[in-house]
Amino acid sequence: MNNIVTKIALGVLLVLPLPDAAKANEPFKLSNAQNISCSRDLKRGRLRIAKCNSYAYLFNTKTSEYFRCDVSLAVVRDAKEVITVQIDGDCVRKPRIFDTDSSYDLGFAETAPPSTNAFFGHGGFSVWAADTTRQKVRGCITIVTGLGDAVSRCVDMTFK
């Protein structure tokens, strides 16, 4: 009985929000622009393949450096059983958006996977970053051209 009470108490602590002071000391923020796409395929021998991909961005609110994180899961099965399961994932470091340290906020968006509205290659993504200590916003767009390196440009917003 005591073990059950301990597990319930631990579960409650895990879902409670952190105090604001603890959050303020943590420079990393996970983007709110997570996405998932799934596909299915039928191979010779009646094998069925289901694959899902998801991505998210991790943003350093102090330096404006960010990481693009991908995870994928593939399942191969026949009519009776699951034959293989493969999972893969990593985070790739991207360059800083601003040259100096400050307090930044972020926003991300990404095109849908290939064969939907990506006109060449994998498509592209945008990054928005704002310095929360002053009126400064930078927008960046990266397009995967399918011809070597991706093309990425940033511009500082003007306020009228």
Image (tube, rainbow, N blue to C red):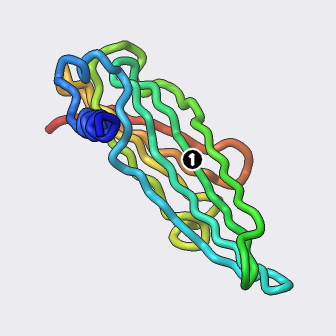
Residue drawn where x is 26% and y is 37% of the image:
5
Q: Nearer the viewer, residue 64 or 70?
A: 70
Question: Which of 61/2 is in front?
Answer: 2
Farthest-out residue, front: 1
Residue 29 lies left or right of residue 110; in this view the side is left
Residue 106 appears in view: no
In the picture provided, is 132 more to the left or to the right than 34? left
Give x and y (percent) for residue 24: 24, 19
Q: Name which residue lies at 54% across and 73% down.
A: 116
Residue type indicated by callout 1: Asp
> What residue lies at 34% left-to-right and 24% top-to-bottom?
61
* Image-based side of 26 in relation to 141, left or right: left
Quarter-of-image position of residue 118: bottom right
Relative to 129, is 141 above or below? below
Disc 1 marks which residue?
70
Q: Is residue 36 visible?
A: yes
Give x and y (percent) for residue 82.
71, 71
Question: Is 89 located above or below residue 106 in the figure?
Answer: below
- Quarter of the image that includes the C terminus: top left
Disc 1 packing (10 Å; few <14; some 14–19; many ≥20): some
- SS at badge 1: strand
**Residue 92 quadrant:** top right
Quadrant in the picture for the N terminus: top left
Q: How many marks?
A: 1
* Residue sitting farthest toward the right: 45
Residue 64: percent from the left, percent from the top? 39, 25
- The percent position of residue 2, horizontal first and vertical second, equals 29, 34
Residue at image point 42% right, 40% down:
140
Q: Residue furthest left?
A: 160
Of residues 40 and 133, the one drawn nearer to the viewer in this rendering: 40
